[in-house]
Every structure is written in C-alpha cells, then in structure tokens.
Image (cartoon, helix red, strand yellow):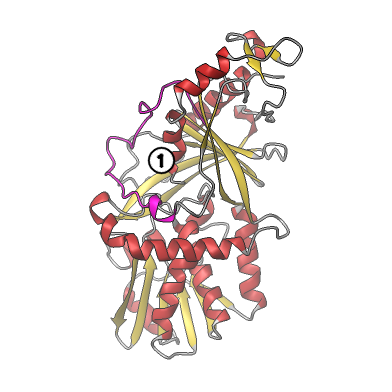
C-alpha cells in the first residue's frame, strides 16, 4: 500500500454500508448501545463481535524523539546501472524515494547481477542503509568477499528514520515515467516481497503483518490527494495487486471509530531497529567487514582496493556524484513510547500512526513544503499538533 493510499483509503468506504448497519441494529439483549468515550457523539449499536482496539496514549509528553529524513526521489525512478570510473566498475543502486526498505532486496538483486558480470570475487559497497546492507548480504550469499564503506552506520543513517511500512511505489517515480519503469519495478517488488516472507516469525519480529484502519468524515471520492506542490507520482500498485489482502469497508457498529467511513487494510511492517540490527549482525557473522569512511568526490573511490563497487549512498549520491536528478522530499515522524498492546496502524486526515515495537510513529502527511526541501530541522510544533489530533480521536472512540 502506498503512503498516499494510507490517507486516501479513508474516503473509500461505501456510505450505503454504514447507513445499512445503523438502520439494522440488533434486537435488545443482543447489542451494545454506546456513545463515544466521554459521552460525545450519538449512540450507535455495536455488534457483539465488534472490533475492540487498545487506545493509543497520544500525549505530547510521551514523545521520545522527532526525526526528519530526506527521501531521494528521482522522476525516472531508481538509478540501477553500471558506470566506469577510472579503472573501476561502479554499479549505482540509489534513488528509491519512499520505497527503499520495501524494494531493497529486489533492487539489490539487480545491482548484484551487474556487479557479478564483471567477474570479480571481491566487492566494495558504499553506504550502510537499506540498499547497502541488502547489496552486501546478497553478495556474500553469492560467494563474494564484501567490505562496506560508509560515513555513518545504523542507527545514524537516513534509512532508520523511515516509517517502516511496505510501500513499494511510494514516490518511486513521476506519472510520466511509470509505464517505462513498471516491468523492472514489478520484478523488484516481487523479489523483495518473496524475501520478506522468509523473515516472518523471527525473534524480535523484524518483519510482521499488521492490520490498519483508515478513517474519514468524508464520503468516497472526497479524500485528500497529493500535496499541491508535489508532482503526480506513478501508481504501479495494480501490477502486484495479488500479493496482499484487499482492503475492506467496515460498516458502522463493527468498529469503535466515530467516523462514518472506515476501511481496514493489511500490510507488512518493518520493525526497523530490530531489522537493521539483524542485517548488520548477519553481515558481520558471515565474515563481512565495515570501514567507516567519508568520500567527498568520485575520485576518492579510486583509492579503494576493490575493482567493482556498488554505490548505495541514497540521497548522499546527489552531493557525491553531482546528481541533480535526485530531489529531496522531506519527511518527519514523532516517536511515542512503545505500547505493545497497540498492534494496528491508523490513517486519518493529515496523519498516520505505525505501531512499531520500538515506538509508535506518528507522521504528518498531506502537508506542503516538503518537495525539494533538504532541511533536517525538526518542526516540533507540527508533530505535537499531530499527536494531539490523534489523542482527540482516541478520546472519541467508543468503548464497549
């Protein structure tokens, strides 16, 4: 599911379904007629099997951190191609927008195939984020000796600031390039999806499936769209519509939300702190080496001993290689103290909530001023306002 669909789906529930549920309340003795918490809102008939959800403690004093990152958007999509640099072969693997974690295994598989075509047995990987780590691990599994070179390591890389949802076509390209990118994107998405199925059920839950709910006061077709100052992004989701459960409308009386339009969706979530630590541990346990090192120009790479390098520097490639095709798209999340009992995601007007094990992430969405904005200064007021809106929703949720 794309991040924009996280918000859009709030407006997709059928009005008729909600109305029918209200009109068809169960007979006395088999129903619960309750108002929203705090006595707000009209009484509604909750079915005996109505969904019950643990409330989020959405209070600003529970914010443990506010994090800003820059998504590396390229209009044509990720750069996965080979370039000669002096006596070295450089394989680029960057520019994945908001889909770095989601596409990492598939994109890195393509990059590794290009690196293997050079015939080398020793590989250097530049960068230690989502794409760097998966490139290095895949190379190890193919029998190569691998060294990672990076200015920063997890948890200090931008990849660690992602929300952690399976969003394989989030800001992956603009609409004009979607048709050309489609086949390669589908290959990357399906390869990554398959790998993630092998990582389910592991200690620490690095990958898991969750349910989420999009809620809205507006009827179908009236939900928010992309921010007005951002391009129309390519929508490729139909190419992999078979990979996950369909989202479904929930009639009134079957859920605790006060909004009339509610949709349930199911998606994968990455517990990024656990997941990144696992990838690092696996790489080192297999004999990998990491060297903390900063590169200022492409010529600096010529000093490395490896003849073939995979460049997985993400947004850093803009400065290192002078690649102005990378446009920063700013994103900000606030992290709340973890609540293990909250196992569902949530999307509503202006914000999303993701229930990661290391904290509940609240992200402002739909706001303007983020496209081509590389400012990493946190806007605490914006995050606090989002947390308060979430808290207001929790206060109005019905209790059975």
Determine the residue positioned at 54% across, 57% down.
156
| Left or right side of 14 for 342 | right
Q: Where, quadrant-wise, is the C terminus in this rendering? A: top right
Principal secondary structure, stretch drawn in magenta: loop
Which one is in front, 362 or 23? 23
Q: Position of residue 157 (x, y in %)?
A: 51, 58
Residue 233 included in the magenta stretch of the image: yes
Q: Is residue 298 left or right of residue 133?
A: left
Residue 120, position in %: x, y?
45, 90
**Which quarter of the picture shows residue 113?**
bottom left
> Is 231 inside the magenta-drawn segment?
yes
Compared across the picture, whether 272 is left or right of 92 comes to right
Vertical arrangement, residue 347 with respect to residue 297, above or below: above
Q: Nearer the viewer, residue 175 or 21?
A: 21
The magenta stretch is 214-240
Q: Is residue 188 visible?
A: yes
Instruction: Please tell me whether mark 1 sits on a helix, a strand or a loop.
Output: helix
In percent of width and height, residue 189 lies at: 45, 61
Residue located beneath label 1 in the image: 4
- Tell whether 35 sits left or right of 115: right
Residue in view at x 31 percent, y 44 percent: 371
Q: Does residue 75 appear anywhere in the picture?
A: no
Please provide percent x and percent y for residue 21: 57, 19
Quadrant of residue 155 within the rendered picture: bottom right
Residue at 67 percent across and 76 percent down: it is: 285
**Mark 1 packing: few (<14 Cα in 10 Å), some, or many (20+)?**
many
State the residue lying farthest toward the right.
Answer: 29
**348 over 280 or under it: above or below:** above
Front residue of 44 and 371:
44
């Amino acid at each position: 599911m794309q991040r924009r669909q996280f918000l859009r789906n709030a407006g997709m529930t059928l009005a008729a379904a909600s109305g029918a549920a209200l009109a068809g309340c169960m007979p006395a003795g088999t129903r619960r007629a309750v108002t929203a918490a705090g006595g707000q809102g009209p009484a509604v008939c909750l079915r005996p099997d109505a969904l019950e959800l643990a409330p989020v403690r959405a209070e600003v004093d529970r914010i443990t951190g506010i994090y800003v990152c820059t998504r590396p958007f390229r209009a044509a999509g990720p750069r996965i191609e080979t370039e000669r640099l002096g006596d070295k072969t450089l394989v680029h693997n960057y520019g994945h927008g908001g889909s770095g974690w989601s596409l990492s295994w598939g994109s890195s598989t393509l990059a590794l195939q290009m690196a293997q075509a050079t015939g080398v047995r020793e590989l250097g990987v530049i960068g230690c984020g989502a794409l760097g780590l998966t490139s290095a691990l895949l190379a190890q599994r193919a029998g190569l000796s691998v060294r990672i070179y990076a200015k920063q390591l997890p948890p200090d890389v931008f990849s660690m600031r992602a929300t952690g949802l399976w969003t394989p076509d989030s800001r992956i390209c603009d609409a004009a390039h979607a048709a050309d990118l489609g086949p390669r994107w589908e290959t990357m998405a399906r390869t990554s999806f398959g790998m993630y199925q092998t990582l389910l059920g592991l200690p620490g839950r690095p990958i898991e499936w969750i349910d989420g709910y999009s809620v809205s006061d507006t009827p179908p077709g009236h939900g928010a769209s992309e921010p007005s100052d951002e391009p129309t992004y390519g929508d490729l989701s139909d190419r992999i519509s078979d990979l996950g459960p369909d989202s479904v409308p929930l009639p009134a009386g079957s859920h605790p939300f006060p909004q009339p339009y509610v949709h349930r969706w199911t998606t994968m979530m990455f517990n990024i702190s656990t997941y990144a630590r696992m990838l690092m541990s696996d790489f080192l346990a297999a004999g990998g080496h990491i060297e903390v090192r900063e590169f200022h120009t492409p010529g600096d790479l010529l000093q490395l001993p490896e003849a073939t390098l995979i460049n997985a520097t993400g947004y850093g490639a803009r400065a290192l290689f002078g690649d102005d095709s990378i446009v920063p798209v700013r994103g900000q999340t606030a992290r709340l103290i973890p609540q293990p009992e909250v196992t569902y995601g949530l999307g509503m007007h202006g914000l999303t909530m993701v229930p990661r094990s290391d904290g509940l992430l609240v992200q402002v969405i739909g706001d303007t001023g983020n496209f081509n904005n590389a400012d990493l200064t946190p806007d605490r007021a914006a995050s606090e306002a989002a947390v308060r809106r979430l808290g207001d929703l929790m206060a109005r949720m019905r209790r059975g």
